[in-house]
Amino acid sequence: MKKKTQKTASHGVNGTAPDTEIFSLRLYVAGQTPKSLTAFANLKRLCEEHLPGQYRIEVIDLVKNPHLAQSDQIVALPTLVRKLPEPIKRVVGDLSNSEKVIVGMDIQSLKAN
């Protein structure tokens, strides 16, 4: 049985309002390549700016766990998948285009609700 390796960063569990939605995000990467590291740094920055205390990031390294790509139908890397709130959304790339990520993850409209 292969070992599942994941990094998880949780924020906002303590001190957030009970009715606050927590964004559950998965970032699929291929090892610690410059593109993977850039994607994680960009995602972390965007979350701190737009979802402070309301997000959880799970990094999945497909070099170590290639079988995990199937569950979220990953065909390119890095790929960001918003698991919650539903519906599931995906953005492919290093996440350097903040506007594309905000629109693709539908962050603004969900924050307004």
Image: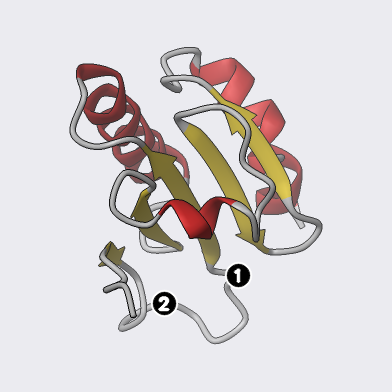
Q: Which residue is mark 2?
A: 16
Q: Residue furthest front?
A: 1
Q: State the residue at coordinates (76%, 43%).
A: 109
- Mark 2 and mark 1 residues within 8 Å of each other at the beta carbon: no
- Report whether residue 25 is seen: no
Q: Which residue is mark 1?
A: 21
Graded by Cα atoms within 10 Å as few (under 14), some (14 to 19) or many (20 or more), the crowding at tag 1 reads some
Name the mark on residue 50: none
Residue 91, position in %: x, y? 62, 30
Residue 55 x/y as whole percent: 44, 60
Spot occupied by residue 86 in the image (x, y as percentages of width and height): 77, 62
Q: Quadrant of the C terminus?
A: bottom right
Horizontal and vertical percent for residue 43? 38, 36
| 37 left or right, relative to 21 | left
Corner quadrant of residue 4: bottom left
Instruction: Specify how the rendered protein is coloured.
Output: secondary structure
- 98 versus 113 height, above or below: above
Question: Eyeballing the image, is 49 above or below 68?
Answer: above
Q: Amino acid at mark 2?
A: Thr
Secondary structure of residue under mark 2 = loop
Question: How many marks on residues?
Answer: 2
Which picture quadrant has residue 84? Answer: bottom right
Q: Nearer the viewer, residue 76 or 95?
A: 76
Q: Amino acid at mark 1?
A: Glu
Give the residue displayed 56% in from the left and 27% down from the top: 76
**Secondary structure type for disc 1:** loop
Q: Is 52 positioned to the left or the right of 83 in the image?
A: left
Residue visible at 44% across and 44% down in the picture: 28
Q: Quadrant of the N terminus?
A: bottom left
